[in-house]
Image: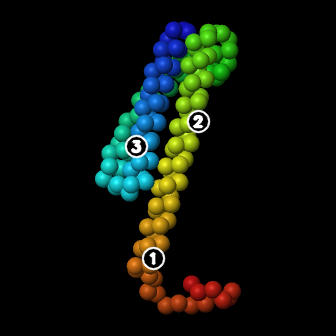
């Protein structure tokens, strides 16, 4: 069980590193406003996520749904503990990069919507509500 789990964790670690690289590429595309390359990044991210999910399913089949930290403590294997810590670190870094990319996407969409409102303003009749604000 230890060897299988170590093997899966090592493969999952490689897949997470590839996902992090793909997220960094997406970050570069977002900074450069490169919409064409961004499409390819999305496909690449989906493939990496699918690969990680496959490893996760295999790991859950071996552990039978028990928490990974409990299993790592029970087995007491140093290599397994090291791999588990490394995966947790990688996942935190990946989550930060994902959140940064999402923030850049939201910021870009907000800017685009403001520009569209400036270029094509609402042409409806303006009325005041009960608070004196224009609708």
Decide if residue 37 is on the left or right side of residue 5: left
Quadrant of image for the N terminus: top right
Residue plotted at (52% across, 43% down):
97
Q: Is residue 46 visible?
A: no
Q: In the figure, residue 92 lies in which quadrant?
A: top right
Horizontal and vertical percent for residue 94?
Answer: 52, 37
Quadrant of image for the C terminus: bottom right
Q: Residues within 10 Å of mark 2 (few under 14, many from 20)?
A: few
Q: Compared to 61, does 45 lie above or below?
A: below
Q: Residues within 10 Å of mark 3 (few under 14, many from 20)?
A: some
Q: Tell me how far mark 2 sits from mark 3, CA to CA.
A: 18 Å
Residue plotted at (43% across, 36% down):
21
Horizontal and vertical percent for residue 105?
Answer: 47, 55
Q: Mark 1–mark 3 contact, CB under 8 Å? A: no
Q: Tell me how far mark 1 sits from mark 2, CA to CA.
A: 38 Å
Color theme of the render: rainbow
Horizontal and vertical percent for residue 115?
Answer: 44, 73
Q: Secondary structure at mark 3?
A: helix
Q: Mark 1–mark 2 contact, CB under 8 Å? A: no
- The label shown at residue 92 is 2
Residue reaching furthest left? 36
Residue plotted at (50% across, 11% down):
4
Please give the residue where the numbered disc 1 appears in the rendered image: 117
In terms of sequence position, does the residue under pointer 2 or pointer 3 come before the other? 3
Q: Residues within 10 Å of mark 1 (few under 14, many from 20)?
A: few
Please give the residue where the numbered disc 3 appears in the rendered image: 25
Q: Compared to 40, does 58 lie above or below?
A: above
- The label shown at residue 46 is none
Q: Nearer the viewer, residue 106 or 62?
A: 106
């Amino acid at each position: 069980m230890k060897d299988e789990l170590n093997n899966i964790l090592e493969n999952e670690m490689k897949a997470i590193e590839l996902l992090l690289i793909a997220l960094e590429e997406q970050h570069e595309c977002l900074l450069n406003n490169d919409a064409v390359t961004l499409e390819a990044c999305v496909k690449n991210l989906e493939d990496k996520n699918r690969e990680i999910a496959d490893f996760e399913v295999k790991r859950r089949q071996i552990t039978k749904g028990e928490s990974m930290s409990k299993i790592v403590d029970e087995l007491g294997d140093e290599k397994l503990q090291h791999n588990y810590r490394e995966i947790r670190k990688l996942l935190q870094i990946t989550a930060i990069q994902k959140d940064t990319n999402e923030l850049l996407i939201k910021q870009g969409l907000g800017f685009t919507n403001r520009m569209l409102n400036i270029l094509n303003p609402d042409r409806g009749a303006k009325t005041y509500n009960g608070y004196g604000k224009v609708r």
